[in-house]
Image (cartoon, helix red, strand yellow):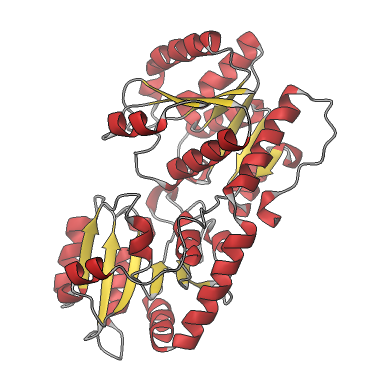
Amino acid sequence: MRTLLLTDAFLPHMGGSRVYYYNLYKSLVSQYSDQVMVLTKKVPGWREFDRAESAGPLRIFRRGRPLPTLKYWQLPKITAPLLDTLRILRRERIEVTHAGDLYPQGVISVLLKRWLGVPFVAYCHGEQITQTEPYRFQPILRNWVYRHADAVVANSDFTRNHLVRIGIAPERIHMLTPGVDCDRFSPHPRNPELVRQLGIEGKRVVLTVSRLVPRKGHRAVLQAMARLTGGLHDCVYLIAGEGPEEESLRRMAAELGIQENVIFLGRVSSERLPDIFNLCDVFVMPNYEAAGGDIEGFGMVFLEANAAGKPVIGGRSGGSVDAVVDGETGVLVDGTNIDELAGALERLLQDGNLRARLGSAGLARAREHFSWAARAQHLREINRRILCPSATRTVENPASV
């Protein structure tokens, strides 16, 4: 099968959904003789990434820059990507399109289906619904795209429930949670060179890996760290990632008097990330729903930390309740309740047996239930059923395998 993925951004652009697409389609082409074309936008570092990744059955085409917002005055900008899509569709003999974003990718997919009969799959990561709700016209466009899709892929139960709420038939929704590469993310000793560079020898380490935006909960972690009753003399908080909150987070750490215990790592390369996870004793990201409906659709980092054998603390919000099994692979808290977060953090830092139990259960769950190969198989079956409606083979839900 020949598939065209339309997405506003792709790796090396930061973001969980972009990592999700990359792993899903790389696994697809590695298992089958299918071909996948990706039509996306130029982002920093794209030339080097494409030279290394765009070969053989996975090919990447870049045009223009990602849209900063989904506003009505952006509508005329559909012309260029529509023409690009038509050219690739004809030249590469595309059989099915996958819309990774609502606009313009979802709109283009609807137009191609209506004009040329090309079927399409639409993705939903949760925020496509929550972030469009406050607006007058965006929900109309959103619902139009999802209702015309031959299949809609949801990344969590949270997302699936929202899709049903807006009127998408349950039988057209397929749940494909993110997976994790357990060969890449696995338990191993701390990298001694990193330990030396960061000056964390003998320290208990708390870690967050994410973009520095409000909903990830960095501010709550800083406040919780300042409340630890045991003191911070042997504790350090590593913050990996970039984003608009960095300066305010640095100021907050200074105001709380814990700046000596907080290390900003900046953007961490994909190659270095497994070593970063293995530095920590506890992974924490107390996500919550921020202004404008900004919410965590799933939280792949929880799986990556679990795959490294680490216990996790997440927010009881959005799709994180699918990523973290409360009391089994980690702890879920109200990301806006500093006392609850501080209590969970202190309990895990002080109880090595509890950390080991949660980390071991998280590792077992990641290995057993979250392979990318199973998700790619499910995605291929969705394609097959769209292209061959008479097929009767049962689609197995990868979230349960």
Q: How many marks?
A: 0
- Position of the C terminus, as image quadrant, is bottom right
Query: Which one is in front, 105 or 280?
Result: 280
Residue 288 located left or right of residue 148: left
Q: Is residue 166 visible?
A: no
Please determine whether, in this image, residue 198 is positioned above or below residue 319: below
Q: Is residue 278 visible?
A: yes
Left or right side of 103 for 31: right
Q: Position of residue 225 (x, y in %)?
A: 29, 78
Residue 331 in percent (x, y) is at: 51, 74
Residue sitting at 21 percent across and 71 percent down? 262
Quarter of the image with the N terminus is top right
- 233, 195: nearer the viewer: 195
Query: Residue 18 location in percent, x, y?
Result: 44, 41
Relative to 112, say whether 19 is above or below: below
Picture quadrant where residue 90 is located:
top right
Q: Residue at x 30, y 50 (%)?
A: 269
Q: Where residue 92 sits: x, y (%)?
A: 54, 13
Q: Nearer the viewer, residue 194 or 14?
A: 194
Name the residue rendered at 30%, 91% in the picture: 230
The residue lying at 55 percent from left, 50 percent from top is 178
Residue located farthest toward the bottom when viewing the structure as drawn: 230
